[in-house]
Image (spheres, rainbow, N blue to C red):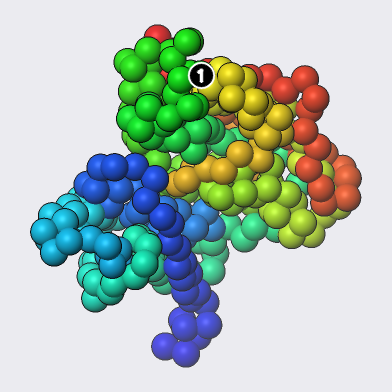
Amino acid sequence: LGSRRRTRRMVLSVDFFYPLIDDPFMLGKIALANVVSDVFAVGATEIDQIKLIVTAPTEFTEKEREVVVPMVMKGFLEAAKECKAPVQIGSIAENPWCIIGGAASAVCHRSELIMPYNAEEGDAIILTKPLGTQLATNAYIWMNEKSENWTRLQERFSVADIEETYRIALESMARLNKTGSELMRKHNAHAATDVTGFGIYGHAENLASFQKAEVDFHLDTLPFIKNVREIADILGRSTKLLAGKAVETSGGLLICLPSSSAAAFCEEYKRCTEHEAWIVGRVEKGSRGVKMNPNVNILTVGES
């Protein structure tokens, strides 16, 4: 028993975020995907325990609390079924702000883990979800609030356009990174992280800084949710977006794996999920930094 314990590792992730959409059920699903994402990012595909933690805003009426909180829980529990792990519901505290999140843990053999520091020169860099979730959800809010930003956007976009962009973002944020985690183990990934609040550039920069080898991550492709690029152009936010520094919520996995396996990974990912994964860059000799191609290739996700 002692030797078995020495080969086991426990992975624990605690994550929270503020509501960014007005659908409590979908919010619960996104919260679950966000909580388990860091565990999947190190190749731990079997979650053993999940805990939901929610704070209800003090400004909620009793009726609002009775309706909204159970819907968040329902969405969280629905999404957790895919993990096949028991879920513990924490006490519902009051707070000036609504905070949704929790904790996820997995115990696995150390050989199953993909440590985040073994990227090799020549690796391909893969991304498993599109970028632009924050702008997509904000545009929907601006539209409903008829804000000044919406006044500018409606010269180019219809309500249906923004609703479609929003729908693509919701589906992406609610999708678990489980399949990506399973496939990166199968295809011998060397390092990975997930893309959230610091954007693809920030998370690539963090991952690069941990590498044992003296390498740089070169990013040359950015896949954006349909209409997001144009929204950024209209509102004067393109510089941050195209630099890969726009905030993301419940984003995809950013994976370094042998270039010889990259195409097979992307093909199998699409076969399993019916969604694209993209080769967005490469690993080259360097000084543990990130280089963004000034002529970055922009892909649009969601076009028919």
**How far from the left and from the top, in percent, is residue 246?**
61, 39
Which kind of residue does numbered mark 1 sit on?
Arg
Q: Would residue 203 appear left or right of 275 to someone viewing this image?
A: right
Q: How crowded is mark 1: few (under 14 residues within 10 Å), some or many (20 or more)?
A: few
Can you name the residue that lies furthest to the bottom here?
Answer: 2
Q: In this view, does 90 lie above or below 269?
A: below
Q: Nearer the viewer, residue 90 or 103?
A: 90
Q: Nearer the viewer, residue 112 or 238?
A: 238
Residue 17 falls in which quadrant of the image?
bottom left
Q: Where is residue 203 in the image (x, y as percent from the top left)?
A: 65, 49
Q: Position of residue 285 (x, y in %)?
A: 87, 43
As drawn, 145 above or below 195: above
Kindly identify the residue that appears in the image at 36 percent across and 67 percent down: 96
Residue 108 visible in the current orientation = no
**Residue at position x 49%, y 27% in the image:** 149
Does residue 297 appear to the left or right of 95 in the view shown? Answer: right
Quadrant position of residue 70: bottom left
Q: Mark 1 points at which residue?
A: 152
Instruction: Please tell me how many numbered marks the rendered image carries.
Output: 1
Task: Please identify the quadrant where the N terminus is shown.
Answer: bottom left
